[in-house]
Amino acid sequence: MSVLVWLLLGADAQFVCLQFGLGPWPEGFERDVQSELSDGVRNDDLDVRTSCAGAAASVRIESRTPSLLAIDVEDALTTRRSGRDLSLQDVPEAQRTAAVAIAVEELLRAQRVAKQPASPPVRQTEPAAVVRRERLGANAELLAFTGGASLLGGSVGYAIDLHPRLAFEAHLLAHALLPLRASNGRIDGLAIGASVALSTPLVQTRSFEVRTSATAACEALIAWGTGAQGRTLMRPIVVLTAALQAHWRFHANMALNATAGVGGVPLGVTLAAGTRDVGSLSGAVLRAGLGFEAGF
């Protein structure tokens, strides 16, 4: 049984929806990709249309650069989504539409990996290079601790998709300690460090995405003032958080994001003015942030 027929097993729809982003696209490119894909699925009694109502699977192709495409596929039966970036830089001009059609067919097969045929049909074309989606971003965020202290600052980071449903992120962090005041003094501070995170999508549309993430951050806190009794105090802190991230893509490779999460502090610090505790980076923590990211 062919994989594409199996893909539709249990569904009434007998066609795949193919849509393109704003482009720009070379003249005839969209028509030729549709024709190549139609040829590839014709033996499975499938059609390729531009209308998505009732389709067995929806395919969307976006242009990140003239030689880099983003392809996303959603299976209507399982609502499972997958995607890949396709580099056409080293593919001859005459073979580019065939390469795109093959990439779409591979994603359709990947939706049901366990059922793909042992020897899937291969059309003669130069293989197109596949690259992982990578992103650079900057964020502003607030960390509020139940111990009474808060950190305000931001981060710059890098993210890469390890899998269509798993991304790895690494960030450099810089936060200012919001001043802690007491009748006998004041404490100021600065925290610098790094964090790593794993995230996975919960909700995805063409322009909006909600992800859940788990983050581990380690920073060195430098505090000064009465609380340090006239000298600089330096202590490490470790913060673990779980968060929801909402991403709004306003361009093919640019997005705004908002983050909200909660967590705990395995390693914290208590700050004192003289002999009096005025706050601590400890207990539970609330995290909120806004940011920007660009893919490449």
Image: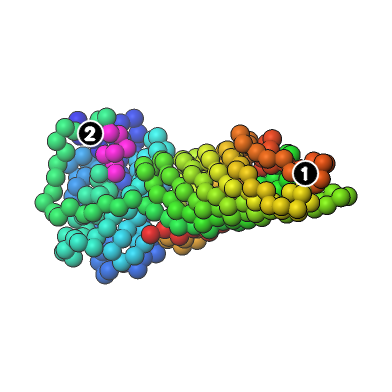
Residue 269 point in image, percent of width and height: 68, 40
Q: Is 154 in front, or is 246? A: 154
Q: Earlier in the sequence, mark 1 or mark 2?
A: 2
Q: Does residue 122 appear in the picture of this structure?
A: yes
Q: Most extreme residue toward the front, as rendered?
A: 230
Q: Which residue is mark 2?
A: 116
Segment tinted magenta in the rendering: 107-113
Badge 2 density bin: few <14, some 14–19, many ≥20, Cα 10 Å:
some
Residue 137 point in image, percent of width and height: 49, 57
Q: Which residue is mark 1?
A: 272
Q: Is 117 in front, or is 19? A: 117
User: Mark 2 is on which residue type?
Assistant: Gln
- In this rendering, the count of numbered labels is 2
Quadrant containing the N terminus is top left
Quadrant containing the C terminus is bottom left
User: Mark 1 is on which residue type?
Assistant: Ala
Q: Residue at x 19, y 47 (%)?
A: 40
Q: Residue at x 18, y 50 (%)?
A: 39
Q: Is residue 120 left or right of residue 57?
A: left
